[in-house]
Each structure stands twice: as C-alpha cells, then as structure tokens.
Amino acid sequence: MKEIIILGIETSCDETGVAIYSSTRGLLAEQLFSQIALHAKYGGVVPEIAARDHSRRLISLVDKTIKQSGCTQQDITAVAYTAGPGLAGALFVGACFAQALAMGWQRPAIAVHHMEGHLLSPLMEGSIDASSHVACPFLALLVSGGHTQLILVKTIGHYELIGDTLDDAAGEAFDKVAKLLDLPYPGGPAVAQLADQATRDNHYNFPRPLLNREGYDFSFSGLKTAVRQQVEQLKNTNVFDETQRAAIAASFQAAVVETLIKKTLKAAMDHQVQSIVVSGGVGANRRLRQDLSAHALSKGIIVHFPPLHHCTDNGAMIAFAGYHRYRLGDFEADNRAVEVFPRWALPSNTSPHNTFSYHTEADAT
Ligand code: KG4
Ligand code: ZN
C-alpha cells in the first residue's frame, strides 16, 4: 500500500502545533509551541495575541518538523489544518499558512475539524494501525475548554452526538473555579494540583448536575455557582485558608469527575459499546483517568486515553485526522479557499459547505 504522509497544522486556540503522520510508519515528527505564558497575565486567552503569535511561530515550527521527520516536501501527500471550531483570527493564520504551503507544493489542503482531531487522537498512539485496537462502534467523551460531548463513533467519519453540555464546558468550569480560588490560567491543572493537597474528596458536597435526568447532557454552571457561594461564605467568615481552598478544589473535582463518569458509563452501557475513548484537555486529569478506567473495567469496558501531551491541543491529532479525511476521500483536492468555521458543529452536518461530509445518523444507515 502506498505510504500517505500528512503534514498537520493546529492553530485554533493558544497552541501552535505542527506534526507529520505517515500511514505506514505512524507519527514521524511533531513540534508544539504553547502560548500559555503569553496569556497567563490576562487570566485567559487573548484572541489577537494568539493569532499574532501563531504567525510568528509557524515557519520555524514547520521547518523543524520536516527536518525532524526525515521527509522532504516531495514526500508530503497533503497539508491538513484546523478549519474550526476555534478563534477566528487564530484559525485564519493556520488556514492561510496551510493553503499557501499546499499551493506551493501542489498538494491538496485538507480542512480538519478540531474535535475530530481530539476524538481520533487516542487511536493514533502505540501502533501504526492503532485504529484496529479500538473496535467501532465506540463512545468518545470529548472534554475540553469549549466542549463536553459524548459522541457515538459508528465508524471513523460516522458520528452521532448523544450528549452535550447545556452551558459551561467541563474545562471552562475548571478555569472559572480556578479564578475563584485565585489560581493561575489555565485552571484545570492548577485546580487538580491543589485538590491533591486535600485530605478527602467530598468535604463539600457540591451538586452532581443532571445525574438524575434522562439522557446524556451535562451542565456545569450550577456547580460553579455552588462553588462561588461557598467561597464567598468562607471569605465572609475569614476561614478561606489553604486547607479550605484545597477542600474546595477536591470537592469540585470530585463532582465533575463523578458526573462525567456516571453519564459516560450510562451512555456506554445503553449503546453496548466495548470501548470508550477520552480526549480534550480535561482528559489529562489524573483523577478522571484513574476513576473512569476502574469503573469501566468493572463493567467490562476498556477506556483509551491519549498520552498526556496529546490530550491538549497539538498538531499530531490534526495530521492523523487529516490522514483519515484523505483516506476516505472526504476533502476537495483543488479547494484553495481560505475559509474558517469558528462555530463548526461536528456531528450534525459538520461539513462547512457540504464539500466534504462527516456523516450524520441518517447518512450512516
Ligand atoms: O483541549 P484543550 O487543550 O483546548 C480546547 O480545545 O479547549 O483543553 C483545554 C482545557 C482547559 O480548560 C484546561 O483548564 C483543561 O483543558 N485542562 C484540565 C487539565 N489539563 C487541562 N482540566 C482538568 N484537569 C487537568 N489536568
Ligand atoms: Zn482542543
């Protein structure tokens, strides 16, 4: 079988990621520049700063990635880039860059959905054909700063959204609670670290939202409000010390993790899948990794996580998803339009212009 080599470019938010994936040899090279330090002093991502920094980094990151891979530009089959969802300006930088490279190299440019990148990333690891290790159908839990979704993956490219957040995403809740606890951006790792200092998980019994409701939707804004009220109460009574901060972090983390686990396992059992994959930044949470794996195993379900450095945004997942778009022929080889889709929904007709299609439930049958 002819080797397909994809250069992937990710610029949807605050990481500039570049990678090269080979259909026969796996991931050949990857480079990542995280802008966390640039945004930290503002307490969150500043879109204009993000876009400018992507354009500053891309040339040297692509250059380094190609050298590291041992490939030449002639070896590269296509250039894949994140076309959405994400920050419009940041996406534009990656789209322009990828389209220009692809035009110069006379190769197709492939628009990739950022969440499909996350969703497929656990399949990439460990083997050149890791997809065979996770049998379809499987359930994907996507937990990032902007998304909390349960997606039934019938085959690669056939997705059905079965659960979504009604308000805040899980990562967003971590980030907001971090601010309440005076922790730096990004909040997730900081809250998790503080939680480790607590002596027990449920000092505060925060709500587990929607657990008793039918279906698989999530809601985290009420939980965040409960945390805010608790913090205010502690501050008013002057007992907002290190021990209390750790207790709040641990109790909040326990509430999020338990909610994610219960909904995910219910969806997995109801749909009779054998495998769950978890990805997105919150997938780096140690507590979620340990507890979900243990609970799922007790029901005979295996959970697959990407390694920690592939949970958060990276170029490898875009190269890998781009490979699958290429393999399925789901791209427009001569499309040189620089277009981005900041609010691009994955399962319900994710195709920005119906130029290529992620199949919906109806299409799959
Ligand atoms: O997937 P990602 O890198 O970017 C988006 O596409 O959103 O996810 C970033 C999110 C942030 O909200 C961050 O606080 C959260 O993932 N995060 C974590 C952890 N590491 C990152 N949340 C909980 N525990 C962690 N260890
Ligand atoms: Zn992401």
Image (cartoon, rainbow, N blue to C red):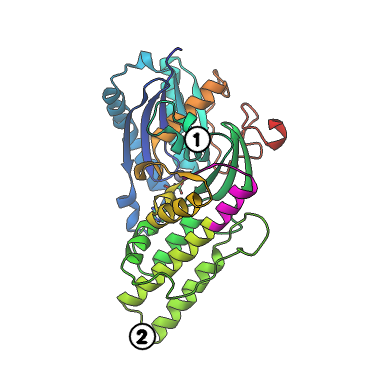
Residues in magenta, as a range: 262-278
What is the x, y in percent for residue 145?
47, 52
Q: Nearer the viewer, mark 1 or mark 2?
A: 1
Mark 2, residue position: 238
* Foreground of the two, 87 or 132: 132
Q: Does the numbered disc 2 mark a residue whose Cβ is under 8 Å from ligand 1?
A: no
* Quarter in which the C terminus is drawn: top right
**Quarter of the image holding residue 273?**
top right
Tell me which residue sits at (39%, 81%) in the image: 235
Residue 188 relative to residue 225: left or right? left
Is 268 contained in the magenta span?
Answer: yes
Mark 1, residue position: 134
Q: Report how many numbered discs are placed on residues in the image.
A: 2
Q: Does the numbered disc 1 mark a residue whose Cβ is under 8 Å from ligand 1?
A: no
* Foreground of the two, 332 or 262: 262
Residue 269 relative to residue 305: left or right? right
Residue type marked 2: Asn
Residue 336 visible from this viewpoint: no
